[in-house]
Amino acid sequence: MRKPSSLVISSCLLWLCLAACTKSGAAGKPVIAVIPKGTLNEYWKSIHAGAEQAAKAAGVEIQWNGPQPEGDREAQIHLVQNFISAGVKGIVLAPIDERALAAVVAEAKAAGVPTVVIDSALAGDAHVAFIATDNRQGGELGGDHLAKLLDGKGKVLLLRFQQGSASTTAREAGFLTAMARYPGITIVSQEQYAGDTEKARQVAESLLIAQPDIDGVFCPNESTTHGFLLALQSAGKAGKVKFVGFDGSKPLADGLRSGYLHGIVLQDPVLMGRRGVEAMVAHLRGEPLVRVQTTDLVLATPENAQEKRVHELLEPDTSALK
Amino acid sequence: MRQLFVRFGPFFGLLLVVALFSVAAPDKFLSVYNLRTVAMQSTLVSLGALGMTFVVITGGIDLSIGAVVALVACASAALVRDGHSIWIASLVCVLLGAFCGLVNGALITRLAVAPFIVTLGTMGIARGTAKWLANDQQIAAEPGWLSDLVRNLPEPAWLMVGKAVWLVLLVAILLSFVLRRTVFGVHAIAIGSNEQAAALSGIKVSRTKWLVYMLCGACAGMCGLLQFGLLKSGVPTAAMGLELQVIAAVVIGGASLSGGQGSLLGALLGALMMQVLKNGCTLTNVPDHVQDVLIGVIIVGAVAIDRWRSR
């Protein structure tokens, strides 16, 4: 043959890449797969860090792999199947969809691979434990704080996250439950959904034009809170409107310190990741498990932002990641 | 030698990837469970690729199929939720897929606009319609035997692989008959080779194109049903980017995007090869970004072969 064929060249490249990239797993250590909903978000990075901490302590190895694109149900189903094939000892899973992932978790159980579910609920009873935040309570916590800031009266606005998302829907419901306790508060808008940060910013800008005299705002997750913060800043209303958000990240922590955010309900994703792996390890050792476990919620305010515990949750420590 | 190589290129490619992972992770990769899983995982892309091969052979492209899959999945979930039988939902939805294809074909021939542009537009329309149908949520419904189709372990067990895999093979055999042994197939190839010459020799170019896009739409419709079975709800945002995976499978399988050339078997092998690569990378703990790069390299490699062949 005159020319080396492209296929041969591609194959050689393939070999090289694989040879270079295959991480050789430490021999003998049991492997646990940890599957988040995505890998890009700070929140999942914190879960990863927690999982790594627990793995080091328990002497197991974790394999971290999330669906791409983030939130792709089918990709997550495929990942679970591939990890079953890979012969992992157990799977810690944050299911994207309550229904869509149930069958594959049952498939894992049938193949002798137990699953611990974290972060979001899963239908069925094929998993051995469920570890998550009490999202409804989180929404109530935020709602009560906002009502206190407003002395129980005023016009309040709720920007929702996304239809069909179980965790944020529970937070929104919790928030509305809390609001119902204060007759002086009127909800002027709760119909708008936002999605990612950019979309949230746009929706929030329109809302601020439509409702120029609002007194308070609640957002149920990181992206909506971040988007609303940006909109308040560009409208020159940051700090004037009482604003309570959800989840920790650098921009939100900065917003809290600058007095633009008056409260952030914080989950503990590091703890959630750690407890997920710990539960799996305990299950593999044959120890009994509490089937449903909730992780803590903390309310961060400008006053307590410097406290160690709050600071840890505002800007989670991800140093366990290489 | 060159002829042989070109003809069996995709086959060699798949063989190579399989051999690679068989060496890297023999006990995991070659297990019955895993082979079964990979076959099932590739069904959606394979099924789409069968229809797309026809479109590519005529020199066209269909970017809308990912969105059509989502639309069909939502429509079938809505029908089942409203109490219709799964058979009715399936029938309506394959027809709905074909109808979307018909719209593509009609717009392309009537407006004489490039398929890329037309289907880019219908992609948005189908995606938006799916979201509207689902009221911006997901439609939960019990897919009955549709989820049986996509189950990894088939019942009865002697089927060896899931029923959806058999469905894909059946469709492939049917379509390869259509492509190689019917007037329609021959016309499709002729149009892709030289549209003007085909028109001058009396081939009804527009009608053939309509049928080709309808066929592609019907395949997308079947994909949508499988997806409903898999996710147990109609998800309007699912199958984003599926069209690109499908086109990649068709190209890896030896089709030429300039038309006139394409192989159904090749497309199946292409889809399988990409899935094996993803699966194998997870098994051997190769990071995700490497998979993307590898698949990109393979696509470019396949196109390079296409150029080499036509030189």
Image: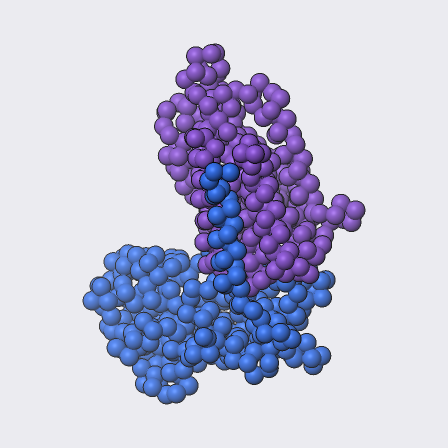
Spot the residue most to the front: A2
In the image, what residue occupies the spot 66% across and 41% down?
Answer: B86
Question: In the drawing, does residue A22 fall left or right of residue A317?
Answer: right
In the image, what residue occupies the spot 54% across and 73% down?
Answer: A132
In the image, what residue occupies the spot 44% across and 21% down?
Answer: B194
Nearest the viewer among A59 and A300 is: A59
Quadrant assignment for the C terminus of chain B? top left
Asked if residue B21 can be seen in this view, the reply is yes
Asked if residue A156 can be seen in this view, the reply is no
- Which chain, by letter, is blue? A
On screen, B66 above or below A76?
A: above
Question: In the drawing, does residue A310 fall left or right of residue B89?
Answer: left
- Which chain, by letter, is purple? B
Q: Position of residue A249 (x, y in %)?
A: 37, 72
On screen, A219 above or below B184?
A: below
Q: Position of residue A227 (x, y in %)?
A: 32, 63
Nearest the viewer among A197 and A157 is: A197
User: Residue A41 appears in which quarter of the rendering?
Assistant: bottom left
Question: In the drawing, does residue A288 fall left or right of residue B21?
Answer: right
Q: Position of residue B294 (x, y in %)?
A: 48, 52
Quadrant assignment for the N terminus of chain B? top right
In the image, what residue occupies the spot 39% across and 68% down?
Answer: A222
